[in-house]
Amino acid sequence: MLSVRLQQILRYINPTDKIADIGCDHGYLAIGAIEKGVKYVQLIDNKAAPLSVAKKNLKNYEKLSKISYSLSDGLSKVDKKVNVACICGMGGDLVSYIIENKIDVARRLDYLILEANSKNEILRKKISDLKFEIIDEDIVYDKKKYYQIMKIRYNEEAPKLSQVEILLGPILIKKHNQIFIDYLHNQLQTIHAIMEKNQVLSEKLNNKKTIMEEILNETI
Ligand SMILES: C[S@@+](CC[C@H](N)C(=O)[O-])C[C@H]1O[C@@H](n2cnc3c(N)ncnc32)[C@H](O)[C@@H]1O
């Protein structure tokens, strides 16, 4: 059974897509994509051990899809046929590096699906600076953690994200669903815990607190 996080990521993949899974690790995302009908999957990892685990896990799927494996860094060896790259389960700074390091590849793709386990602000700032637009966004709660998922594509005309959008996600703010509200409360609880220990909030954290309180008060 796939995790809630991976199931949500898979919703952004169409059966007609040709995907590259960057940082494939165990290969579960690729398996989910093939089960959804995807016929072309490139699994990429920069370490040999996870790639060989993925190969074992995908053995029974070889008849269902064209599967290839690359021991390589980020987007550097993405096949020309691939139209969608998934970069999931890493920190926001590493996802940012992977995109910027091979920006020509990232820009020619139809879209990228990103899920950073941390530092989503850094990631949103970077993709905005590199002229990608966020087409869709979601937040899920899985094994006591919140995960933010973004579908992005290159758009030379993409307007720059505001400070609030970088912090909380332009589409997450608009969707304003229950998980997003819970996430805001959860973040504010952490900030209040810091304040209860009489620690002075940094200017950055204080700004975050104000923005999150305003967003909650505006729409609840
Ligand atoms: C925590 S796993 C995430 C697995 C899967 N993508 C998921 O979301 O469940 C991160 C994987 O990314 C790989 N990785 C880290 N940096 C990478 C890079 N620059 N290029 C390719 N793979 C990378 C690691 O070896 C590891 O297998």
Image: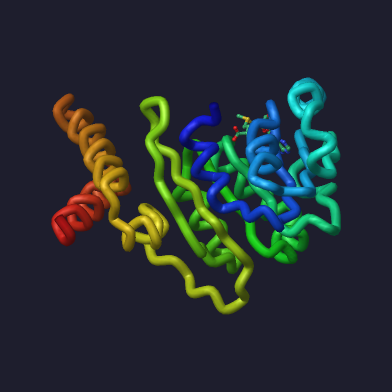
Find residue 71 and report its image quarter.
top right
User: Horizontal and vertical percent for residue 92?
Assistant: 54, 43
Foreground of the two, 203 or 184: 184
Quadrant of the picture in which ligand 1 is shown: top right
* Relative to 143, residue 137 above or below: below
Q: Residue at x 53, y 41 (%)?
A: 116
User: Horizontal and vertical percent for residue 52?
Assistant: 81, 23
The answer to whether 38 appears left or right of 192 in the picture is: right
Picture quarter with the N terminus: top right
The answer to whether 168 appears left or right of 126 in the picture is: left
Foreground of the two, 82 or 183: 82
User: Horizontal and vertical percent for residue 196?
Assistant: 14, 28
The answer to whether 178 appears left or right of 100 in the picture is: left
Residue lying farthest to the bottom in this orientation: 157
* Relative to 145, residue 149 above or below: below
Q: Residue at x 22, y 30 (%)?
A: 194
Q: Residue at x 18, y 34 (%)?
A: 192
Find residue 158 and report its image quarter.
bottom right
Q: How is the image coloured?
A: rainbow
User: Horizontal and vertical percent for residue 51?
Assistant: 78, 27
The answer to whether 182 appears left or right of 74 in the picture is: left
